[in-house]
Image (cartoon, rainbow, N blue to C red):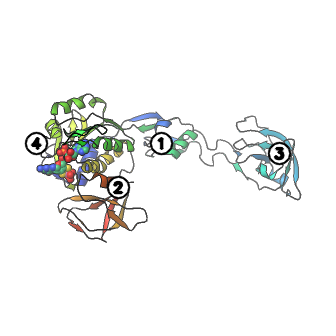
């Protein structure tokens, strides 16, 4: 990437730049138990039909419907029980006319049987069974292949693997799936004012919160985050913190140290090393950086907690989802009426935080536009997008929302 540094990106353009930085992740074969939330990289074809054989849907008796056609509570029909078929039995004998086989749910249907009488409609006999109701042909029989026919594609490439899809893979006998492996993301916060939560807080310091938030956001989409010990504004310590882990990582995400101050450690360490520091016409999230350091993709987020969080949300999250092969990388959107008037700078898109619950006509802005308002962000569930060029949204006007949960 050449000469990006002087350019001002729109949020859309910058999002595309970050997406291009993170290539598709390698395809690996993983046991089902480790595939939750990942994306299937190749079609899965069923090696067996489901059900794999005709079987009973009820505990009861396999019969010929014609043999019990006259049965009722007043005039029951009694049949000899010629066999007993638990689930898993393989040596199933044919059903002779005028007889019944006791059968359990999931057990193979004996040849000749064409209906199941559930046990509640009988006396439950084991030598002879009294049947108190007629049943129609096919009742409570689950036919071979009625769910899945052998040889068909049950899960196409691109399927996101939620519990039902994993269950289906197991049901057709597949134990491992080809998926794009989780991205390994290094998370590094910078700033001499930072103190780990749980430690005493000296004057002039603040608790470090970005790495927890960013690592959780990585893990929420199925990534593996390694939080590096945050570093003070010291270029050598910054480089050393990364060096140890860089070879195994797919992406480095830093926060802080990218604006215009005198001690911008990320900028100082990475300028001239493959990373460009740019501006995005967006609030929060104006100062940004991206590039490759010795081949490792790097995204440098601004340090203000809401700036870092929204930059991840709008740029890094879709890039990682794309690299994982997700067919949809965008959050759902909605429109709602603003519950209060909001102002916005003319030359950039503003993302305000809001609450919009299902069925609500309105969206309620939570807190102001400040990028330090972490509690407001934590109390919100959507972003209100105020486009570039719009300086005021009057109460009652419709706005676009990005729904976060
Ligand atoms: N003269 C200018 N000053 C600033 C500009 C500008 O354009 N010109 N941009 C402002 C904007 S917008 C942002 S955003 C910030 C970005 O600054 P940095 O990325 O260099 O971040 P820091 O200065 O290190 O920190 C900003 C702020 O956030 C707090 N912080 C940082 N890291 C963490 C963390 N891990 N956990 C919790 N809080 C963190 C930090 O203490 C600062 O308060 O620059 C503006 N200034
Ligand atoms: O753009 Mo900064 O990221 O607003 O606080």
Along the viewing direction, whichever of 211 and 288 lies nearer the viewer = 211
Q: Are marks 3 and 4 in contact (CB under 8 Å)?
A: no
Q: CA distance from mark 1 to mark 2?
A: 41 Å
Q: Nearer the viewer, mark 1 or mark 4?
A: 4
Q: Position of residue 153 (x, y in %)?
A: 52, 45
Instruction: Give the residue displayed 26% in from the left and 53% down from the top.
Output: 373
Along the viewing direction, whichever of 178 and 32 lies nearer the viewer = 32
- Closer to the chain start, of discs 1 and 2, is 1
Q: Nearer the viewer, mark 3 or mark 4?
A: 4
Reading the image, the residue beneath label 3 is 100
Q: Position of residue 384 (x, y in %)?
A: 30, 60
Reading the image, the residue beneath label 2 is 379
Q: CA distance from mark 3 to mark 2?
A: 64 Å
- Closer to the chain start, of discs 3 and 4, is 3
Q: CA distance from mark 2 to mark 4?
A: 34 Å
Instruction: Find out if the beta carbon at label 2 lies less than 8 Å from the nearest ligand 1 atom.
Output: no
Q: Position of residue 390 (x, y in %)?
A: 21, 66
Q: Are marks 3 and 2 in contact (CB under 8 Å)?
A: no
Reading the image, the residue beneath label 1 is 43
Q: Secondary structure at mark 2?
A: loop
Q: Is residue 345 visible?
A: yes
Q: Are marks 2 and 4 in contact (CB under 8 Å)?
A: no
Q: Secondary structure at mark 3?
A: strand
Q: Nearer the viewer, mark 3 or mark 1?
A: 3
Mark seen at residue 262:
4
Q: Is residue 234 above or below residue 392?
A: above
């Amino acid at each position: 990437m050449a000469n990006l540094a002087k350019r001002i990106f729109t949020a859309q353009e910058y999002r595309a730049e970050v997406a291009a930085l993170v290539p598709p992740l390698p395809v690996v074969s993983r046991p089902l138990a480790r595939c939750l939330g990942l994306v299937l990289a190749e079609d899965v074809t069923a090696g067996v039909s489901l059900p794999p054989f005709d079987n009973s849907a009820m505990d009861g008796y396999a019969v010929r419907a014609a043999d019990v056609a006259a049965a009722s509570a007043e005039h029951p029909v009694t049949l000899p029980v010629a066999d007993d078929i638990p689930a898993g039995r393989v040596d199933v004998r044919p059903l002779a006319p005028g007889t019944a086989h006791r059968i359990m749910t999931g057990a193979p249907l004996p040849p000749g049987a064409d209906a199941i009488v559930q046990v509640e409609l009988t006396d439950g006999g084991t030598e002879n069974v009294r049947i108190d109701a007629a049943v129609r042909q096919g009742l409570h029989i689950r036919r071979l292949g009625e769910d899945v026919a052998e040889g068909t594609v049950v899960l196409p490439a691109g399927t996101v693997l939620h519990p039902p899809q994993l269950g289906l893979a197991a049901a057709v006998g597949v134990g491992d799936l080809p998926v794009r492996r989780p991205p390994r993301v290094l998370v590094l916060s910078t700033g001499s004012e930072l103190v780990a939560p749980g430690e005493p807080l000296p004057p002039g310091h603040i608790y470090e919160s970005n790495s927890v938030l960013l690592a959780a956001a990585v893990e929420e989409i199925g990534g593996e985050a390694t939080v590096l010990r945050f570093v003070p504004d010291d270029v050598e310590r910054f480089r050393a913190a990364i060096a140890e882990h860089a070879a195994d990582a797919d992406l480095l995400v830093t926060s802080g140290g990218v604006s215009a101050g005198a001690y911008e450690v990320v900028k100082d360490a990475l300028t001239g090393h493959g990373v460009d520091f740019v501006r995005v016409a967006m609030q929060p999230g104006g100062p940004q950086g991206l590039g490759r350091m010795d081949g490792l993709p790097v995204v440098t987020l601004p340090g203000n907690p809401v700036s870092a969080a929204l930059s991840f949300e709008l740029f890094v999250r879709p890039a990682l989802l794309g690299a994982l092969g997700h067919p949809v990388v965008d959050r759902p959107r909605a429109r709602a009426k603003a519950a209060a008037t909001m102002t916005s700078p003319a030359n950039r898109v503003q993302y305000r935080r809001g609450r919009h619950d299902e069925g609500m006509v309105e969206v309620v802005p939570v807190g102001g536009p400040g990028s330090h308002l972490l509690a407001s962000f934590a109390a919100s569930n959507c972003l209100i997008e105020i486009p570039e060029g719009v300086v005021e949204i009057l109460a009652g006007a419709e706005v676009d929302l990005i729904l976060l949960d």
